[in-house]
Image (cartoon, helix red, strand yellow):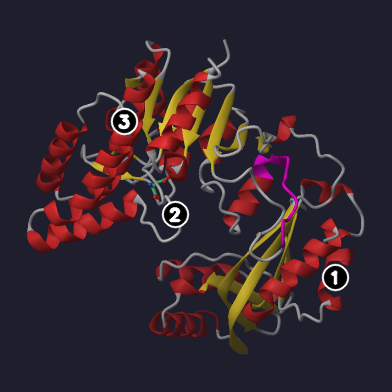
Amino acid sequence: MAIKVCKFGGTSMADGTIINAVKNIILSDPERRYIVVSAPGKRYSGDTKVTDLLYACHKTLLEDGVCRRGFEPVRARFISIVRELNVDFDIISILNETEKRINEEKNEDFTASRGEYLCAQVVANVLGAKFIDSENVVFFKANGQLDGEKTYKAVREACSDCALAVLPGFYGQDADGKVKTFSRGGSDISGAIVARAVQASLYENWTDVSGFLACDPRIVDSPKPIKKLSYKELRELSYMGANVLHSDSIFPVRKANIPIRIKNTFRPGDAGTEILPSSRYMPDGSTVTGVAGKKNFTVIFIEKSLMNAEIGFIAKVLGVLARENISVEHIPSGIDTMSLVIASEQLTDFKLQRVIEGIQSEVSPDTIRIIENIALIATVGQGMNSSVGTSARLFNAIAAANINIKMIDQGSSEMNIIVGVKNEDYEKCIKAIYSEFFGA
Ligand code: ASP
């Protein structure tokens, strides 16, 4: 029988009623065997996610020496969930034990991970499933990266003897044996790891939206849902801000060619978005799949006559950034010019000054100019590389909206064109591109 791994996000765990709906979803399909859960999310706008309560709890632990004050709202939240579920489950003992361990460990990652830990215990009880603690099966190397080999083996072994199991997302064990979390939203990665480990036929990612939309619904009213995406398109779109799925979560499943399906817990009948390995992805004839973007980039523009003839020019410039530990987003270049596009949050005034001085002393450019408040917008579509005139349509649409393009970058994969515009033109530009390709 095929195996499906299902990850349920925080809003799908928010209260007892929703967890009961999740139970029905899981039990309605016997192929849904390995379940990964996030910590309970917001119940209503203005509510606080359990993970955020736990980060605050860690602060009280540092201030008071014990976590009691900060742990209280977490305790109350889980007691209320178990009460709503009306199950015979001794959550109090698990909460007491957890509070004690938070006080002993005094480790922020450990504290933050307890939302997933407690939630998985509750869900395992509700389903009558085995609880597998990710602390014992997900391993990080000393450099902080996932130890894939060790992890896949341990997860596979732990899952092998059970028909239904629940694992907490978001954390594992570091090389020193301590609990370590992924970055925020990391339960998506945990789900993908489990899917890879058990060789699932499908990784279902259950959330509170019916999949990816062709652009941000806060900018365009009811954008079209995306039915199908390739891994590559997903990576581009989620990296550029379409935040349905953690942008790192595809790596484990991509290697194993496992498709992902985004589903909506609150509308389980909706088809959602299917994300397929490129080998199995058949474009549906549309040129552009989606548009996404991010604000707040800084461009360092460098000009020097005969730059193209100077061996090692770019390497020297990039060396300055590497020494400052700054990552570069894009490097559009001409024969005598190059631009470095960098997320502004990486550049404090002081750091920017050091970078400019470093570049000046390394390569003595004729000009260095800093352009701030730039937004990047990616127009993504695997269909682009086989259709003529996409960039003409894109640039015409932007020109017709009277927006000045500050930078253009087209990757050689020909599946995305990135433009840089002023932050203040960001929304207008997204609307113009969307209406050109999707006819809003
Ligand atoms: N609970 C964690 C967070 O809020 C991880 C997750 O939900 O995926 O970031």
Q: Which amino acid, mark 3? A: Val
Q: Is 51 within the magenta?
A: no
Q: Position of residue 437 (x, y in %)?
A: 84, 58
Q: Kindly state the secondary structure of the residue where label 2 is placed.
A: loop
- The residue sitting at the left extreme is 65
Q: Is residue 309 visible?
A: no
> Which mark's residue is nearer the viewer, 2 or 3?
2
Q: Note whether 62 is above or below 266 in the view shown.
A: below
Kindly tell me whether residue 184 is visible in this rendering: yes
Residue 20 pos. (x, y %)? 43, 30
Q: What residue is shown at x 73% (from left), y 31% (from top)?
A: 279
Percent position of residue 192, x then y: 50, 34
Q: Which residue is mark 2?
A: 44
- Crowding around mark 1 (Cα neighbors within 10 Å: few <14, some 14 to 19, many 20+) is many
- Disc 2 crowd rating (10 Å Cα; few below 14, some 14-19, many 20+) is few
Q: Which residues are magenta?
A: 221-232
Name the residue that disc number 3 marks.
122
* Lower position in the chain sequence, tag 2 or tag 3: 2
Tell me which label, 1 or 3, sits earlier in the chain: 3
